[in-house]
Image (tube, rainbow, N blue to C red):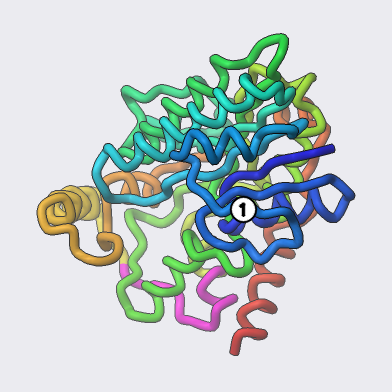
Amino acid sequence: MRVLVTGASGMLGGAVAQVLYERGDDVTVLQRRPSGLPCREVLADVTSVDAVRQAVRGQDAVVHLAAKVAVTGPWREYERVNVAGTRHVVDGCRATGVGWLVHVSSPAVAHSGTSLVGAPAGPAEPRTARGHYARSKALAEWLALAADGPSLAVVAVRPHLVWGPGDTQLVGRIVSRARSGRLALVGSGAALIDTTYVANAAAAIVAAVDRCEHAHGQALVISNGEPRPITEIVARVCRAAGVRPPRRRVPFPVAWAGGAAAEALWAVRAPAGDPPMTRFLAEQLATTHWFDQRRTRAVLDWTPAVSLDEGFVRLASWYAGQA
């Protein structure tokens, strides 16, 4: 199969492209910087209509992962990359006869800040999604699924909190803040959350490519299906990296108010780096959110191969190799 993967310089996009390549598919990757993958590479931005059109031409399937993933920044940037970029991918698929599109979304598109206990995927809702990233991804998912039809089969997958060796988002931020003594738990730390080891997320996305004709028109949340207390997740990441887990706790109202203040400061002054807290992050750290995986596994004919426990062993081994 000829497959284009956008956003392959990221951890998950690179893992997806590697799985496809290793099983013998003809893989092309599109991203702004070199990926280091043994695939045909197009260095471009999904905001370029011409670059996207050229990259999708001749492909059987497209896996669209490229996105602006951040907690701050002006709306126009999220709209330009996540919404308009997705529109360019969809339009390119339609214009060049691509048959299958797997759009990689996020569970945040359907999260309004309340607890989610064994929840289904739920519809994407830009009006209640929390923050620019979630809102833009909700709009992008709408665009992608609206294109589903006889000539283009589209499925949206929502991997939840993907992590693994080399992760600069979830793992990298936890470890960096723990090392500097700036990491604290929000609330009791007992909220149960789902996470997804990167190899499992990549395998599920490849399964979505293979099952696109069967799964099209649907949105599916992907996770390990092993909800754990946030305290445990954070502690095990810290131990894998050889740093002390946090002991300090911040009440949720204090964290939420601090996040609001930080967002206001970043909007005015735009300091370097991410704010120490945002309202969305406070909600994520203090609120239970895990998802029923039965439908996802049945539709994709997929189950996670790497347990969380094994994932933490692999993460610790990776950090040991970095020493």
7 relative to 47 in the view: left or right: right
Look at mark 1 in the image and give the residue it sits on.
Answer: 8
Q: Classify mark 1: helix, strand or loop.
A: loop
| Foreground of the two, 237 or 173 | 173
Question: Residue 103 location, x and y as percent?
Answer: 60, 32
Q: Does 309 sit above or below residue 133?
A: below
Q: Residues within 10 Å of mark 1 (few under 14, many from 20)?
A: many
Residue under the point 61% across and 51% down: 42
Residue under the point 78% across and 20% down: 213
Q: Is residue 187 magenta?
A: no
Q: Does 220 sit above or below residue 203?
A: above
Does residue 210 appear anywhere in the picture?
A: yes
Q: Quadrant of the N terminus?
A: top right
275 relative to 20 in the view: left or right: left
Question: Residue 158 location, x and y as percent?
Answer: 58, 36
Q: Is residue 245 magenta?
A: yes
137 relative to 31 in the view: left or right: left
Question: Residue 31 location, x and y as percent?
Answer: 55, 52
Rendered image quadrant of residue 100:
top right
Q: Quadrant of the C terminus?
A: bottom right
Residue under the point 66% across and 85% down: 321
Q: Does 89 sit above or below residue 274?
A: above
Q: Which range is magenta?
A: 237-248
Q: Does 170 sit above or below residue 105?
A: below
**Which residue of the protein is positioned furthest toward the top in this rendering?**
150
Question: Residue 214 location, x and y as percent?
Answer: 79, 19
230 relative to 96 in the view: left or right: left
The residue type indicated by label 1 comes to Ala
